[in-house]
Image (cartoon, rainbow, N blue to C red):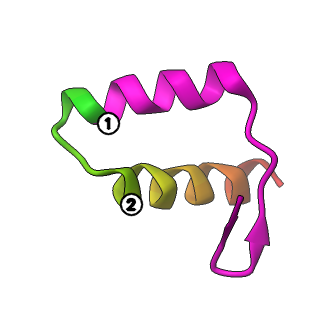
Amino acid sequence: MTKKGFTIKLDEELWKEFSIKCIKKGRTKADILEEMVKEFIKKA
């Protein structure tokens, strides 16, 4: 999955966790991706 030049190999659990969290906040998939990219950068 590529977004803004980053290639991210998502781990299933993390994705589910994020999806659930973001859906509860009424956010879109694009928002979820944005969030994942930020998290990924923090961990990198």
Q: Tell me which segment is drawn in magenta.
A: 1-22
Q: Tell me the SS state at disc 2.
A: helix
- In this picture, residue 9 sits left or right of residue 27: right
Residue drawn at (61%, 49%), measured in percent from left and top? 39
Give the quadrant of residue 15: top right
Residue drawn at (36%, 57%), measured in percent from left and top? 31
Q: Which residue is mark 2?
A: 30
Q: Amino acid at mark 1?
A: Cys
Give the quadrant of residue 20: top left
From this view, report whether residue 17 is shown above or below residue 7: above
Where is residue 7? Give x, y as percent: 80, 64
Q: Quadrant of the C terminus?
A: bottom right
Q: Residues within 10 Å of mark 2 (few under 14, many from 20)?
A: few
From this view, report whether residue 22 is shown above or below residue 3: above
| Residue 3 falls within the magenta-colored stretch | yes
Residue drawn at (47%, 31%), measured in percent from left and top? 18
- In this picture, residue 44 sits left or right of residue 29: right
Q: Amino acid at mark 2?
A: Ala
Where is residue 43? Give x, y as percent: 77, 47
* Residue farthest along the bottom direction in this orientation: 5
Q: Which residue is mark 1?
A: 22
Q: Nearer the viewer, mark 1 or mark 2?
A: 2
Number of labels in the image equals: 2
Q: Quadrant of the N terminus?
A: bottom right
Task: Give the alpha-carbon distance from disc 1 to disc 2, as whole Å.
Answer: 10 Å
| Residue 12 falls within the magenta-colored stretch | yes
Q: Tell me the SS state at disc 1.
A: helix
